[in-house]
Image: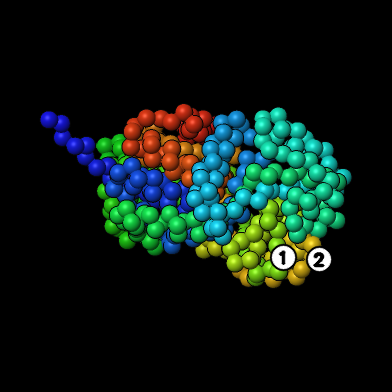
Amino acid sequence: MTSPQSETHVAVLGGGILGVSTAVHLLRRGASVVLITEGELASGATGRSLSWLNSAGKRSDAYHHLRMAGIDRYRTLFAADPAREWLQFNGGLFWAPAGEATKAEARHEYEQSHGYDSVLVKPEQVSALTPAIDETAVSDVAVFNPGEGWVSLPHLVDYLMDEFVARGGELITNAGTSRVLAAEGKAGGILTQDGTAYAADKIVVACGAATPSVVEEHDVYIADGSPVSALVITEPADAGPKAVLNTPRAAVRPNPGGSLAIDHGWYEEQIVEAADGTFSLAEDIIQELTEEASRLLVGNPQLTPASWKIGRKPIPGDGEPVFGELEKLPGCFVAFSHSGATVGLIAGELLSFEILTGQKHPMLETFRPERFSRC
């Protein structure tokens, strides 16, 4: 008679979408999970992500395939309840600065070459594809991607945490800066800032831009290219776009409650970092970004910033995700990616498979941490 397989105890460090998704998928597979987060859930990059669901533009084939699988999982979730205000698929619209139409045309041709749904449109054709866009704001030509969507990650985290609690997961919030414990060359648990240790068979580090520094203590190097960025949420707007907009001066998506989420990169050098690690941005820059978004919409409605968050946007040094077990610290897995929104569900699914089966999933083959060196 064979004895039943013992339950695997996993500690997940990080309360953003990658950590929460991995924790829930582990629970679905029968593991015991404690989820530990520095502050509150979704208080880091997950709470200030534009969260555009896409695989637009150029990237490696492996990354494209992973993102497309990620979108597929969101479509399954969307199909279960299309009325969810925080997850919608109404396409994405991109255009380049005036006089640079060749950039949009090249992007469209590349997307078409590998079957990504892509339509090249003139300004006067935009309103027929997606409403509420001021066609005079569109320079030259635009690319419309009908299959793209968006998600409000804080809402998704809340949704997943309902399942986390129902399946018996343990949540530790406001744990402060935590460390990975190791013994005899293997990961053995998490030590929180107040000295509490949580023993575990396997560890997942999903701390956004802090991930490289967490594992560096164990002589693991992961190149970090994380910039500082901001996300502005407006007061409810009378007529917002349905599609996600990626334009020369503002990126905009709908947001639950009729508000808009706005970001871009042109102001990043004006973000100020204080000695305590917090960030600030002059309110006139926030207002300028909001005005740039207004110029994209029919009637150029006055948009009012309601709130904004500033922090590091997780981006590995080579732009590609980092997923998998550390060779130098067996039992410790990392999840570090720029596209945390698009790959959030699929990454949790594939990592939980690797953690509990001991097998390496082929879709994560090119994203292993060991590809980096200090040279």
Which quadrant would residue 135 be assigned to in this image?
Answer: bottom right
Q: Looking at the rendering, in which quadrant would you find the C terminus?
A: top right
**Relative to residue 256, is residue 133 drawn left or right?**
right
Dot 1 crowding, Cα within 10 Å, few <14, some 14–19, many 20+ = some
The residue at 77%/57% (across/down) is 133
Q: Nearer the viewer, residue 77 or 306?
A: 77
Residue occupied by mark 2: 299
Return the residue nearer the eye: 45 or 105: 105
Q: Residue at x 64, y 59 (%)?
A: 254
Q: Can you identify the residue that label 1 sits on? A: 239
User: How many angstroms separate mark 1 from mark 2 (CA)?
Assistant: 9 Å
- Could you tell me which quadrant the N terminus lies in? top left
In the rendered structure, which amino acid carries the disc numbered 2?
Gly
Percent x, y for residue 108? 75, 37
First in sequence: mark 1 vs mark 2: 1
Q: Residues within 10 Å of mark 2 (few under 14, many from 20)?
A: few
Q: Amino acid at mark 1?
A: Ala
